[in-house]
Image (tube, grey):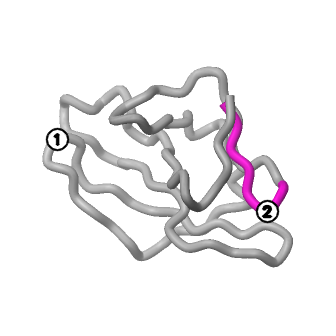
Amino acid sequence: MKVTFNGAVIAESDDTIVVENNHYFPPSSIKKEAFSDSKTSSVCPWKGTASYYNASVDGKSVNDVAWYYPKTFDKAKNIEGYVAFYKNKVHIQD
């Protein structure tokens, strides 16, 4: 799986985990230089509290492009720290 934004690859992995139709990418597979922390958070009743990333590539930025769970509840331990992307903000392809 590959995620692109503004023509640049910002995440790529063959080891994503699919949960609720979203591909969660291992933290090591994202291009950290393209991301900054967002102040946004949300709560999932079975995964825990999500944190968000903004992305910026070649002068183009998008807020809250991706989310991850730094500390998950027990049922979601397999995606702890993994990063998922909003399909309407980036291009995701196999």
Query: Which residue bears the numbered disc 1?
Result: 46
The number of callouts visible is 2
Q: Earlier in the sequence, mark 2 or mark 1?
A: 2
Residue 43, x across and y down, in percent: 22, 58
Judging depth in this view, the residue of 40 and 19 nearest the camera is 19
Residue 33, x across and y down, in percent: 74, 59
16 relative to 89, above or below: above
Confirm whether the magenta stretch covers residue 8: no
Amino acid carrying mark 2 in the image: Asn
The image quarter in which residue 30 lies: top right
Q: Which residues are magenta?
A: 1-7
Residue in the picture at 49% in, 45% down? 84
Amino acid carrying mark 1 in the image: Trp
Q: Quadrant of the N terminus?
A: top right
Among all residues in the image, which is located at the extreme front? Answer: 88
Foreground mark, 2 or 1, reads 2
18 relative to 4, above or below: above
